[in-house]
Amino acid sequence: MRPLVPTPLIAMISIVVSITFTNIVQADDAAAKAIHIANEVCAGCHGVDGNSLVPTFPKLAGQQKVYLLRELTDYKTGKRVSETMAPFMESLTLEDLPHLAAYYAKQKPAPGVVSNPSLLAVGKTLFLQGNSNTDVPSCDSCHEEDGSGSGKFPRVAGQHSEYALEQFRLYATGKRTNGARVMKAVAERMSEEETRAVAEYMASMP
Amino acid sequence: MNRPQLSSALALIAGIIFTCQAAHAEFKQPHATGIETYGYAWNSPDQDMNRALAHKADAGKGEAAYKVCKGCHKPDGAGLAEADYPQLAGQHASVIIKQMMDIRAGRRDNPRMYPFSGEWIVSAEEIADIAAYLNQLPFPTTNGKGNGYNLPRGKALYLKDCASCHGKTGEGDAKKFYPMVAGQHFSYLKRETRESRDHGRRNASPEMVKVLKNYSDADVEAVSDYMSRLNIVR
């Protein structure tokens, strides 16, 4: 008796099914591993969902995936240097990083804390208009009007002002050198008051 | 401190200074030869520029890539008169490409813009896309203008010396990389014309510099005022 479905076709279908299934399982495995890493390696400083409680450690929840992956890769390859991050990065492989970036990008960012509301007006003006007297471009052109960022330009809305201030300082003094040419110029041109004000305004953005 | 300790401390300090300088130098605009150099040829072929010119430009992609520019040149491309940020809306794509590449290569000195114009932030292809995007933006009429006191003098100078290249209505020439000057901010035109006369704009055309040689500051101002008021019907 002839089979209802020819054998080669069954073989083909089963190969396709098994390849697809393997891919899904592998992707699931990697995502599960990313969650495991986030919990075991990163959560201590950055919080389980990427909303760090300590204001010197950046919030990662809702961060742009492209930006996060670049930063993680730069930490891994030594282009971005942090004594605090170094020992934790050692336990990660380059293959882990895209999944980790995807995990944090999907988390819901918690609102930031404003410590000096009197600076918000100055911060808002600089963020949306820049300062043409000192050639500081407006921040919203790259980081978007709502501070959500896009692609390689990081989300800044709701970020801890302490962390943001430290980054401005590192850029201005040439100590943060990865992806820094634009931000070095910006940070150098900003006054101390403008820097504080913008950090407060960014923290205030939902 | 004994001698070996002292010398190793000095070596350490020297090392730190050297490292800092090296890190700093990396961010500085390069310096290429320009009009101040004997044998300078205007608009000589450039690899970066050829790549941009050969690219099939996409204005849609250009709108996205324009992101880094609009912090100063504004979303409508109008720039900012009081800060001498040129207006770019409607400018010829070839002109934008040439000027960008001149800044990237250090043929046109612009430390203000250089950090925002390098290949780390925009590729040659993206520059072509941005140029195509800007070219199709509506021509603005709200640009900064001069005081209007010397317009007949400005007109006479323009028609005698400038119109043959930049066009009777200031439309420029895309094929020849001559910028559209109509509707440009007076403050920017004045600064660039004066800089060209004084060899400060090092990528200027020698022909133009020759013409400008005898211009007084008042002439520069008059012709800039006239150009800022030219209006192109597109």
Image (cartoon, coloured by chain):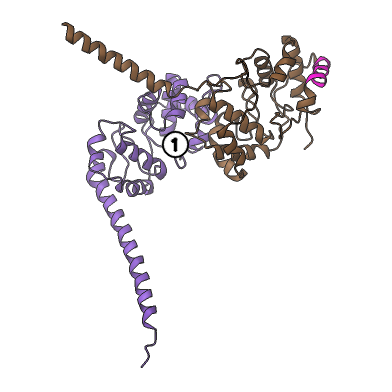
**Chain (purple):** A
Which residue lies at the image location 64% right of the left edge and 14% below the top edge?
B199
State the residue in front, A194 or B217: B217
| Residue A135 percent location from the top left of the image | 53, 22
State the residue in front, B32 or B151: B32
Which residue lies at the image location 62% right of the left edge and 37% below the top edge?
B131
Q: Quadrant of the N terminus of chain B?
A: top left
Which residue lies at the image location 48% right of the left edge and 36% below the top edge?
A143
Residue A173 in view (yes/no): no
Residue B97 in view (yes/no): yes
Magenta range: B151-161
| Residue A93 percent location from the top left of the image | 27, 45
State the residue in front, B73 or A193: B73
**Chain (brown):** B
* Quadrant of the rendered image containing residue A56: top left
Decide: few, some or many residues near mark 1? Use Cα within 10 Å; few <14, some 14-19, many ≥20. some
| Residue A29 percent location from the top left of the image | 28, 57
Magenta residues: mostly which secondary structure?
helix
Side of B92 relative to A113 (left or right): right
State the residue in front, B93 or A190: B93
| Residue B183 percent location from the top left of the image | 73, 28
Mark 1 residue element: loop
Side of B205 relative to A13 (left or right): right
Please give the residue where the numbered disc 1 appears in the rendered image.
A205
Residue B121 against residue B85 in the figure, above or below: below
Three-letter code for the amino acid on which mark 1 is drawn: Met
